[in-house]
Amino acid sequence: MKLTADDIRLYLLPEVEERMRHYTNLAAGEVSGLGTVEQFDGGFLVTDIFLPRQECSQGGTELDQESVATLLMELDNAGQDPGALKFWWHSHGGLDTFWSRTDEECIDNLANGDYLLSLVTNKRGNVLARLDIFKPVRVTIDQVPVSVRST
């Protein structure tokens, strides 16, 4: 598939957006999760999200690595491709949406494939998304448009 920067779009299934919004609103501080992605001619579609065990506070969230490993095994055991886990989302609670130093470090740590889509949201419903491509060279495309789209 050949995409230009203008072609890159991030779509969320309605139930994915609803669950992400629900988790964000319920969290006392920040919360984060992972999701599966499918590529198609119109960009990228987040098909499911997961909420691994994590340490959360008002100013940060850290995924439990054992819980993430368990999620990968569960996807594989269910006949799903664990390599499709290419989406990381998190909230900034009541703060604005931006990429913090901690966010940048998390994206670097999640660089286990060709690319990662990341999204930060807040309780006001603002979103900011980006695409990080890791191979053959590191490229970051920020402010990727986000929409809700049904299948």
Image (cartoon, rainbow, N blue to C red):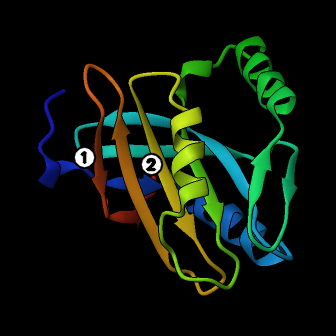
Q: Residues within 10 Å of mark 2 (few under 14, many from 20)?
A: few
Residue at 15% x, 49% y is 5
Residue 142, percent from left and from top: 31, 58
Secondary element at image label 2: loop
Left or right, residue 75 beside residue 26: left
Inspect this view and state whether residue 82 appears: yes
Q: Amino acid at mark 1?
A: Gly
Q: Which residue is mark 1?
A: 42
Residue 6, percent from left and from top: 13, 54
Q: Which residue is mark 2?
A: 151
Residue 40, percent from left and from top: 30, 36
Q: Residues within 10 Å of mark 1 (few under 14, many from 20)?
A: few
Question: Image quarter for residue 78?
Answer: top right
**Closest to the observer, 40 or 91:** 91
Residue at 25% x, 26% y is 137
**Closest to the observer, 92 or 34:** 92
**Closest to the observer, 128 or 74:** 128
Residue at 49% x, 51% y is 118
Residue extending furthest front?
101
Q: Amino acid at mark 2?
A: Thr
Total numbered labels placed on residues in the image: 2
Q: Which mark identifies residue 126?
A: none
Question: Image quarter for residue 124?
Answer: bottom right
**Closest to the observer, 137 or 15:** 137
Q: Label 1, label 2: how many angstroms apart (C-alpha)?
A: 12 Å
Residue 79, percent from left and from top: 68, 13
Tell me the mark number nearer the camera, choosing from 1 and 2.
1
